[in-house]
Image (cartoon, rainbow, N blue to C red):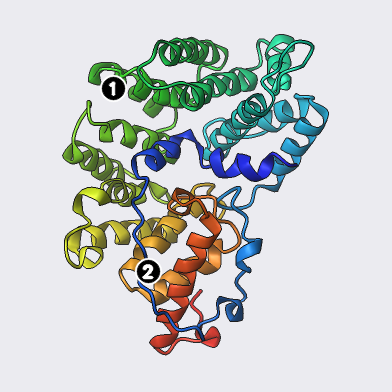
Amino acid sequence: MEILFVLMALVLIGFVLLPFLRRRRGMIEQVPAGHPDAADPETYGFVRTEELDIRMPGPDQDLLDVLDVVQRTQDYRAAQQLLAGTEAEGELRWQRVQAFAGAAALELQQRPGGVGETPGGQWLRVWRTEAPKDAGGAAVHAEFLVQQAWRTSTRGTDDFRIIMEEAKDACGQAALLAPGDPIPYIVELSVARGLEYSQKEFEQLWLKILDRAPAHMGAHLAALHYWCEKWHGSRELANSFAEAAAARAPQGSLLAAIPLFAVFEHLPEVNLVSGFYQSEVVTKAMHGALFAVHAARPDDPMLAHVRHLLIFFLVRAERWSEAMSQLIHVDGHVGALPWTLSPDPAGEFAVYRALAVAGYEANGGSPATLPH
């Protein structure tokens, strides 16, 4: 289990969201000092800071159990079975593909191998060798290559391009094994950024995803980042994409929260505006995300991601009661934006949680009136 602590913070949130972290380093400002010492989050039943789990945004015990087995035994079959039993079109399978790929990538980074030594992540290579027609293994391998490119190579170098081209081929092979599966095409969205697809190439790829999983939240976040890249567009293009996704969101979908992620991505450009967090643009995006959270299934795998981002904005906007309402749903897990921007995600989350509690109590709140 020793690899899991690092794994889930870097991987489960995924390389769908990791580009946000790279572009947003240094984004989180110092929060205001002086919140009351008497405001104690523990009186609300919140988890102590040192016990917060940074590996994932919310619980997925099946995934953690299988990762433990795979890493302890180096036998891929438990991972194969878990993916085979996970809905192909859903968010959960995408997150699990990312997690397995990240586990192999981190193992390889820790144990690159040498003369007479077996490199880390050998179970993934065995998986591909023994089950070459397994769609789950093919998707994990494609994502593994994408992660290897971003982790080990510098963008624009020959090594980076070579690995990305290999990842592109692996995406194509995975797609052939499961024609209706959106995962290979979602993996290719990271390739599209790395290889700088033209707008036409990207739109052709995006249509394949829409044909298979039109309301896939993870895919939309990856696509949003493509539009945020400097060589492909502007803030206006990214915002237009986010607004269009929210407008066509089906009932119960979290896509109505996409504009809040777009606002978050561009905070460095607009955060100098006085009262920004109470502004119309942020308020509208927050209301869309709050509506999406209210309408979503309680077991939606992306729900925790949206709640965590809402906490950041609601605290900044001094909407204490609403922030507390989100906190009671996600407290205990902090492996999500924006906390993972910090070298100490648990500490960053704890600061915002303390601010929410202090603001809530300063306005007459107490554990007895905690919103649900």
Q: Residue furthest bottom?
A: 364
Q: Which SS class for mark 2?
A: helix
Count the labels in the image: 2
Compared to residue 270, the image places residue 130 above or below, namely above
Q: Position of residue 340 (x, y in %)?
A: 48, 49
Marked residue nearer the N-terminal end (1 or 2)? 1
Q: Which mark is residue 83?
A: none
Q: Is 273 on the left-hand or right-hand side of 315?
A: left
Q: Is 283 on the left-hand or right-hand side of 132?
A: left
The residue at 40%/25% (across/down) is: 189
Q: Is 186 on the left-hand or right-hand side of 347?
A: left
Q: Which residue is mark 1?
A: 203
Q: Position of residue 7 (x, y in %)?
A: 62, 39
Q: Which SS class for mark 1?
A: helix
Residue 311 showing in the rendered view: yes
Between residues 38 and 308, which one lies in front from this camera angle? 38
